[in-house]
Image (tube, rainbow, N blue to C red):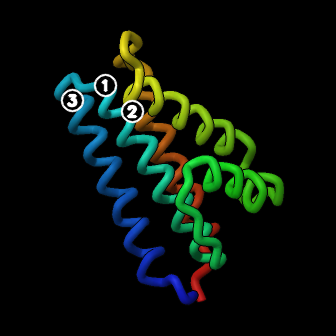
Amino acid sequence: MTFHADEVAANLERAEQSIRAARDQAADGYYDFAASRAYYAAFYAATAALLSENVDMTKHSGVIASVHQRFVKTKKLNEEHGKNLNWLFELRNVGDYGATAHVSQSDAERAIQVAESFLNAIKPVIKRQ
């Protein structure tokens, strides 16, 4: 694997844990928190993929832009996954920062499905050297 092998593995594990946490939060009716965890699952998966290419980003906007540049534009990920990452980020902002707006149950459930799909799609993209 690459120089960042441990970090790649750790981010993938955090992505898996975040999916499980999102499901738990949604089951308990905490849809804002479920949406946030779903986004973070995708964020950690995206970070792992970037680290596998020796790209180390910490800002959310940088990670999202790099996913589009390195994986969507090069057809390693389909365009729908790129759009879904953007949507998860927007939904996370509602869940984390919306003073009066909240994430609906249906959006939280969709976010979990989208995040899991993103994670499954990005795993084969990760360079394992």
Q: Which residue is mark 2?
A: 35
Q: Secondary structure at mark 3?
A: helix
- Quarter of the picture containing the N terminus is bottom right
- Quarter of the picture containing the C terminus is bottom right
Mark 3 and mark 1 in contact (Cβ < 8 Å)?
no
Three-letter amino acid code at disc 1? Answer: Tyr
Q: Which residue is mark 1?
A: 31
105 over 67 or under it: above or below:
above
For the point 44% across and 76% down, the residue is 7
Question: CA gap, disc 1 to disc 3?
Answer: 9 Å
Tell me where residue 25 sits by quadrant: top left
Q: Secondary structure at mark 2?
A: helix
Residue 108: % across, % down? 39, 27
Three-letter amino acid code at disc 3? Answer: Ala
Instruction: State the residue lying farthest toward the top.
Output: 100
Mark 1 and mark 2 in contact (Cβ < 8 Å)?
yes
Q: Which residue is mark 3?
A: 27
Question: CA gap, disc 2 to disc 3?
Answer: 12 Å
| Residue 23 disc label | none
Horizontal arrangement in the rendering, residue 124 relative to residue 4 (left or right): right
Q: How many marks?
A: 3
Residue 81: % across, % down? 64, 44
Horizontal arrangement in the rendering, residue 110 relative to residue 105 (left or right): right
Three-letter amino acid code at disc 2? Answer: Ala
Q: Is residue 57 visible?
A: yes
Label 3 environment density (alpha carbons within 10 Å; few <14, some 14–19, many ≥20):
few
Residue 76: % across, % down? 74, 60
**In this view of the protein, which residue sits in the foreground, 83 or 66?**
66
Q: Of discs 2 and 3, which sits in the foreground?
A: 2
